[in-house]
Image: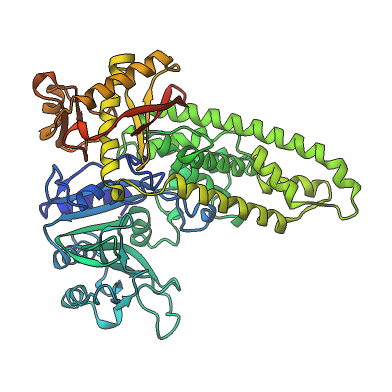
């Protein structure tokens, strides 16, 4: 079974069980500064898991593009990925543990669906702690389906508990499904959830039945929800008996494009461990970069936030491409577009932008490498004078930190001159750099819409007022490209080709504050997308929407100030928001401007 078939079968199964299919969302989360990217299928649905009404109903199914950046340095082995696809089904106060588990088991084992032999399935459930009891309910459902006791493992909170998304909110136990690859067990305690490699996780059912309070207690929720996640790449690997996600059809055309671009060409993947690792890194990183650049809310390579991650992915791919004699990564990006355009049409729609941004970043990095090599040559005479013939880790880190020069290239250049690099000293400096970055990041990205409450809602409403004011001052081309909200400020990106004048900034500020002072009502209605647009509502270009959407109107009657398709949440009246002040207007990327503002 290939990935397209798995995606289709999953959707078909849950549609036949009364679920509504919803569209997967952007890779760039809106109004959640806790993360740079959408990290799981549940991420865009957090407001609905927290209690908001979803326009499509209480039983949902979708597939979602995701990026996780924690394992970038591990990519190159047989399993780690930066970009991946997640299948998910959701119950918002409808079915709970029994319904979710029985549907999961049927989809996995029925010959009509995946047809995995039942004896290959093992599961884990929450073992209980001082906050919540052991999940005997889930274990009993699995027993009723024929899963024997030795394939049901009770696991602690770090393994079998989800949430909350912030410091407080919905959370609960989960039950994970594993596939037995047939390897010998590592010992008497080996069972589903063991990390020895015998058991591979393929699906996770999360049961949100508690609310964690600010006092740290866990209270039962009146509305219990289910969210599940199944990774497409890993499941396809299991279904086809492959050892690695890179051995599946998901990556076949991308690997072919890499090996075809190698100099000399004709390399067969699987021939050399070192070269295979570089090929896998290029495949993953260019696939990830292509999806980020092809997203409706695409970011450009930069030195901060999501743009920095994108730059790092591209430059690491370029570096490994150089190792293999690959002159350009653009044909590999085109292979990604062609492979995934059917499931994600936005890739084909944005192909020219993807290629141009990759080309620009490739060129910038090659210039960076030239500067780094020049700086190395300047350092060389003094190093050669020394008796140790060792380049200090401090200087190697300076080349990395100041010029973006990779340590591997520094080591290569040093070796050519008969020198070595003090890698231990470099690693120490790099570790301090990482710790500082993480500390700064925790300040920049602390909190999120989930746990910031009242101020976040005010700022979210302010984005609507700002969007409309920009249209009035600059023109309708000033369309929202993204926003980022904390409890302290808002950031708003929009399309505009030149800096705003000080008069334009002042005009926008005055317009927004006028609407706040008018204490306008904010109302919501459910409409079809066509009805919403006919009523004058703005829907963000390139965004994916359900058949029914929430439309938020600021103002009354036909003389409303703002009307947008949006998931919410918003204040009830604008008069509660405070004074709006623009602190900075600056460039975000080519053709995109950024406003930072506060409510006081």
Residue occupying the point 66% across, 56% down = 427
Residue 54 x, y percent position in the rendering: 15, 45
Q: Does 109 sit above or below residue 230?
A: below
Residue occupying the point 70% across, 44% down = 398
Residue 471 vs residue 196, the one in the foreground:
471
Q: Does 147 sit above or below residue 93?
A: below
Q: Does 218 sit above or below residue 237?
A: below
Quadrant into which the C terminus falls? top left
Picture quadrant where residue 174 is located: bottom left
Q: Does 343 sit above or below residue 574?
A: below
- Seen in the image, is 444 located left or right of residue 436? left
Residue 80 x, y percent position in the rendering: 46, 56
Residue 468 vs residue 581, the one in the foreground:
581
Residue 570 seen anywhere in this rendered image of the structure: yes
- Give the number of marks: 0
Residue 202 x, y percent position in the rendering: 32, 62
């Amino acid at each position: 079974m290939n990935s397209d078939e798995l995606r289709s079968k999953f959707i078909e199964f849950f549609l036949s069980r009364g679920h509504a299919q919803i569209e997967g969302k952007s890779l760039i989360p809106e109004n959640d500064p806790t993360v740079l990217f959408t990290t799981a299928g549940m991420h865009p649905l957090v407001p609905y898991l927290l209690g908001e009404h979803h326009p499509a109903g209480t039983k949902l199914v979708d597939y979602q593009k995701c990026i996780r950046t924690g394992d970038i340095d591990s990519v190159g082995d047989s399993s780690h990925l930066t970009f991946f696809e997640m299948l998910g089904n959701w119950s918002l106060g409808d079915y709970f543990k029994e319904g979710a588990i029985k549907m999961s088991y049927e989809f996995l084992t029925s010959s009509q669906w995946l047809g995995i032999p039942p004896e290959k399935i093992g599961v884990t459930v929450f073992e209980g702690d001082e906050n919540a009891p052991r999940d005997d309910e889930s274990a009993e459902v699995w027993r009723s389906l024929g899963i024997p006791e030795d394939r049901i493992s009770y696991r602690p909170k770090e393994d079998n508990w989800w949430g909350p998304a912030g410091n407080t909110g919905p959370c609960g136990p989960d039950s994970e499904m594993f596939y037995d690859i047939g390897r010998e067990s590592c010992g008497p305690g080996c069972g589903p959830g063991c990390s020895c490699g015998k058991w591979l996780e393929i699906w996770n059912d999360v049961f949100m039945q508690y609310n964690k309070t600010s006092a740290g207690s866990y209270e039962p929720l009146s509305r219990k929800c289910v969210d599940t996640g199944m990774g497409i790449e890993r499941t396809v690997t299991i279904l086809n008996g492959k050892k690695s996600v890179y051995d599946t059809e998901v990556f076949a055309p991308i690997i072919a494009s890499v090996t075809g671009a190698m100099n000399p060409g004709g390399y067969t993947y699987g021939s050399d461990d070192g070269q295979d690792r570089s090929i896998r890194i290029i495949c993953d990183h260019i696939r990830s970069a292509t999806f980020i650049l092809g997203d409706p809310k695409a970011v450009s390579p930069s030195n901060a936030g999501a743009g920095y991650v994108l730059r790092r992915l591209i430059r690491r791919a370029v570096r490994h491409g150089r190792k293999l004699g690959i002159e350009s990564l653009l044909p590999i990006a085109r292979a990604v577009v062609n492979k995934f355009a059917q499931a994600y049409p936005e890739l084909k729609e944005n192909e020219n932008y993807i290629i141009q941004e990759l080309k620009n970043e490739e060129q910038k990095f090659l210039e960076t490498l030239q500067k780094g090599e020049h700086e190395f040559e300047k350092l060389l005479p003094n190093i050669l004078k020394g008796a140790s013939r060792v380049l200090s880790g401090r200087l190697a880190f300076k080349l990395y930190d100041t010029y973006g020069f990779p340590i591997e290239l520094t080591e290569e250049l040093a070796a050519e001159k008969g020198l070595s690099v003090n890698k231990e000293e470099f690693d120490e400096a790099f570790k301090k750099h990482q710790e500082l970055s993480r500390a700064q990041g925790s300040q920049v990205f602390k909190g999120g819409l989930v746990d910031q409450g009242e101020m976040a809602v005010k700022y979210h409403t302010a984005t609507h007022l700002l969007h409309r004011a920009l249209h009035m001052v600059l023109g309708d081309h000033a369309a929202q490209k993204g926003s980022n909200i904390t409890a302290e400020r808002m950031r708003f990106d929009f399309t505009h080709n030149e800096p705003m004048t000080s008069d334009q900034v002042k005009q926008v500020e005055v317009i927004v504050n006028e609407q706040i002072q008018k204490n306008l009502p904010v109302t919501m209605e459910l409409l079809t997308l066509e009805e919403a647009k006919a009523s004058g509502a703005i829907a963000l270009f390139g965004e994916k929407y359900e058949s029914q959407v929430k439309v938020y109107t600021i103002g009354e009657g036909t003389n409303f100030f703002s009307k947008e398709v949006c998931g919410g949440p918003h204040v009830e009246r604008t008069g509660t928001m405070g004074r709006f002040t623009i602190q900075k207007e600056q460039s975000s990327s080519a053709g995109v401007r950024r406003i930072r503002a506060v409510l006081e």
